[in-house]
Amino acid sequence: MCHLDNVGFSGCLARIDGFLGGTHELLFLPGSFDLYNLRKNWVQTMNIAVLCHPSAGGSGVVATELALAMVGLGHSVHMVATQVPFRLNAMRLPRLMPETQGSSELQHGEVYFHQIENANYPLFEQPLTTLAAVNTLVEVIEEFEIDLVHAHYAIPHATSALQAREMLGRTKVVTTLHGTDVTLVGLEPSFLRTTRYAIEASDAVTAVSGYLANHTNMVMGAKKDINVVYNWVDVERFSPILEASYRARFALEGEALIVHTSNFRTVKRPLDVIHTFAGIAAKQPARLLMVGDGPERPRCLALAKQLGIGQRVHFIGSLPNVEMILGVADLFLLPSSQESFGLVALEAMSCGVPVISSDAGGLPEVNVNGETGFTCEVGDTSAMIAASLEALEPGRHALLREAARARAITHFHQDVILPDYVRVYENVLKDSRLRPLEVVAS
Ligand code: GMT
């Protein structure tokens, strides 16, 4: 039985009872047509399952954006996660809806959400989510004739996908490495062998930066040909907001509006953000918005008070539409000690915001020192203060703004990156029999 929880637009949220022996939340979304022209060339459709973290992190964003883009090309995508990934929420529907109206000559792909059911048993110290994911995945692969599973993160997701492949003796596994799965967790002795196996046994592996691809093989000792596929940004959604009256909600006239967004883990070095901001505010009127939440938040709050800038630093929690803040920012700070790519830095650049970041990991591949902002050594807050003040000088600021936005568009637009993922999928499936695409756009 199908219950419609939300109707009135072409997408709907449905709950299917008794389906696959349990209750599965199915979120059906119509596809978008950003890549309409690319689709002309398609003759076969793929059924893809995506395993990702649903929380407000970059990997979930990348997984969701890729899923929606593949749907736009006419393929079917089944997202498997413990919760609906945060970008695949109801806010997305009104944005897609107008694009689909009046386009009835096109057949859309679909994206479905399948929740990982998890039983807890007193004998287990923790819920066995990795095994539960295998179970859900196996059901989805069988029921929907899945051609490939795209696992975002080597552990635990690639491990679950490989187990499902083993159990069924079919489907391919593409794994995308996002960072901490390799740079931090994967190097823990307790996970090293499992992570290396997950990478080597996948049918194809992608990494979100050249740094991460090299690091994986050099530091982890994995022997795998890794495709570098950068993250992309929606350059229309993340664009400058020029209305002064809207900006006035966040900063007074004459104040520089500085923004940091993260999950406030130590790896993001949010205390460096506070120190850097204190140095900026000592020289010119400024305000800092700290977007997100996490374990270091109380220490950041205490430090801001201790440095006498408590009134100028605002902690505003996590936001689903961070572009509404980035769009009016003057500077973005990302001093992380480890960052395989730095999707938030790219989102800021797309909004025309110069980035002051560390030079860790893949950040220099995104933020070009002296062109789109500045990169400084990890922990060198004096350099970050000097770089910030230089970036805020009016003439310099205008140039950096322009270059940041231009780089996001030319290097990290969906149209530039998506074909790379498609090539990886096609390559993995080159010997598989796929379904013919029902309608090929003229
Ligand atoms: O950085 C985080 O804490 C979140 C993590 C995630 O799971 O989303 O981000 C990683 O993946 C992003 C998307 O590919 C990258 O932009 C981030 O740089 C990467 N984080 C780290 O490498 C620390």
Image: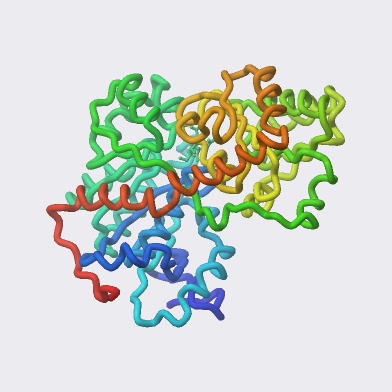
Q: Which residue is most to the left?
A: 431
Left or right side of 38 for 43 = left
Percent x, y for residue 247?
77, 52
**What is the count of numbered marks?**
0
> Which of the 4 quarters of the picture holds residue 95?
bottom right
Q: Residue 280, position in %: x, y?
A: 77, 27
Q: Residue at x 40, y 38 (%)?
A: 208
Of residues 385 and 183, the one nearer the viewer is 385
Quadrant for the N terminus, please: bottom left
Can residue 116 be spotted in the picture? no
- Outermost front residue: 395
Comparing 409 with 10, the one in front is 409
For the point 51% across and 41% down, the residue is: 343
Place residue 176 in its image quadrant: top left
Residue 185 seen in this snapshot: yes
Give the colouring mode of the picture. rainbow
Judge by depth and name the residue closer to the eye, 346 or 212: 346
Q: Is residue 103 above or below residue 189?
A: below
Look at the image and tell me in which quarter the C terminus lies: bottom left
Residue 249 to residue 57: above or below: below
Drawn side of residue 85 relative to residue 229, left or right: right
Residue drawn at the location 81% of the way across and 51% of the way down:
248
| 41 to 221, vertically: above or below | below
The answer to whether residue 222 is left or right of residue 25 is: left
- Left or right, 416 with reference to 281: left
Where is residue 236? Give x, y as percent: 54, 57
